[in-house]
Image (spheres, rainbow, N blue to C red):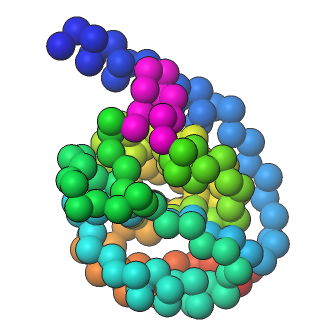
Amino acid sequence: MILKGLKTKSIQKATKKSILDRTLVPTSEKINSVGVMVSKDDFKVLETEITDLKKMLNCKHLQYISYTQKLKKEDVADVISPKYFGWKGILKHENLKSFANTEVDVLIALTKQPDLCFEHLFAKSNAKFKVTNHEKLEVIADLTINLGDENFKTFKDELTKYLTILNKL
């Protein structure tokens, strides 16, 4: 129990360091690559919706990863859980490392209730522009679209509206 608390503190410290180390360089470049993080426990996002998002944003590359509190045997390789996070926020899974280290133009994080590991991955990722739907992640995100419901279509519409205003589409 004590070790779990110490591990939590080390991940929190690594998250704060990631937030402080990030330098935001404002650009009006068009979007070429998008990363999507979805809490599988909160949102039921279908593969077709992700494909529609890629078409809607007119991007060439899209990375998708889903997060769950408890990993099940039937979960695929793109599903991650807190067991893939080590002390000091070290990423222990290759898909997770790849997702965090790939530089994307826009990173979208969707969750109802972010936990420490979800927040850490969002902070650690190499994204130029970060978008979320939860106010707890406002410290990390550049844009927060809080709709209050789990309707992914409404979120996509609002996202395209704001990205058009920011001259990214």
- Outermost residue, top side: 2
Q: Nearer the viewer, residue 114 or 78?
A: 78
Please provide percent x and percent y for residue 100: 59, 48
**Residue for point 56% across, 67% down:** 63
Q: Residue 62: which quarter of the image?
A: bottom right
Residue 89 vs 49, above or below: the answer is above
Main SS of residues in magenta: loop
Please provide percent x and percent y for residue 141: 54, 53
Residue 63 vs 84, above or below: the answer is below
Residue segment shown in magenta:
84-93
State yes or no: residue 149 in magenta: no
Q: Nearer the viewer, residue 86 or 134?
A: 86
- Outermost residue, front side: 73
**Quarter of the figure with the N terminus:** top left
Inspect this view and state whether residue 52 appears. yes
Q: Residue 155: which quarter of the image?
A: bottom left
- 96 left or right of 149? right
**Residue for point 60% across, 33% down:** 18
- 104 left or right of 155? right
State yes or no: residue 90 in magenta: yes
Please provide percent x and percent y for residue 2: 22, 9
**Quarter of the figure with the C terminus:** bottom right
